[in-house]
Amino acid sequence: MRQFISETRYRVFSNRQERLHTGVKIGATLIYIVTVVSFDRHVVGRLTPFLLYPILACSSIGLPLSANLRRLLPALPFCVFAGLSNLLFERETTFTLMGIAVSYGAVSCCSLIFRAVLCVEALIILMETTPIYALSLQLRAFGLPRILIMLFEMIYRYIGVLNAEARSLLTAYALRGGSGRGVDVRHAGSFAGSLFLRCMARAERIGNALKLRGYSDTETPLVARKPIKPSDAAFLFSVCFSCLLFRFVDVPLFIGTLWFALFK
């Protein structure tokens, strides 16, 4: 029952978000990400107000926390490794917390991971509330190169095909005497080569099927341009105003000062 309610809320919010102009959603996401990454690498506390956007959106979508974490996991290792390098190069102490010296490298590492989580969350919200065809058409309207849009469409649509080919090859490997716990190091090269050849053959068959069905990457589909409504402008204005406010005003410091002044 709880899953049914969550799925119903997700569909309702997604349908409501699909009414928004796709270009407005892309612009709002871009403004949000640019504002988040514009902070200094030693800033952590001032990034906390930016949690409002993903929290409110994800609660409205009804996206479970476990699904959210699964989408974040592929991006976190790169950020963690990049942040760990700061621990080696920035060893000066910035402050002491409960007798423990905290270096500039630790602060920049936390800031990098925090900003990566916020940016990935914004992209997840955009992808969850916008169909892939709407994104592609809007990117073409923005004038992006067609080859980039075609690669984006193919990677998004057929990443599942690659996963299926890898699972099939892994099953065949296990049935032919594999360890059952993955590919042995001795066979990793031949496994990767076989997967590459299978994917190339599958991609060629998919390409031929698309051409037989009249697909062309040089032609832009003729669709009616969706006008920007007042609700679209209000959404974009609210996101821009919030990002500028959080960027140039230290909201946590202001709230802390106000709280201390009222309840001291």
Image (tube, rainbow, N blue to C red):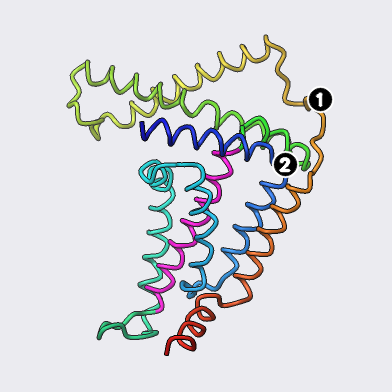
Q: Residue furthest top?
A: 212
Q: Residue at x 41, y 78 (%)?
A: 104
Residue under the point 66% across and 53% down: 28
Q: Tag 1: residue type?
A: Leu
Q: Is residue 72 left or right of residue 53?
A: left
- Compared to residue 144, the image places residue 75 above or below, namely below
Chief secondary structure of the magenta span?
A: helix
Q: Identify the residue at the far front of this view.
A: 263
Give the number of the mark in front: 2 or 1: 2
- 116 to 211, vertically: above or below: below
Q: In the image, is 131 to the left or to the right of 228? A: left
Q: Earlier in the sequence, mark 2 or mark 1?
A: 2
Q: Secondary structure at mark 2?
A: loop
Query: According to the image, label 1 marks what residue?
Result: 222
Residue 136: quadrant of the picture: top right
The answer to which image quadrant residue 196 occupies is: top left
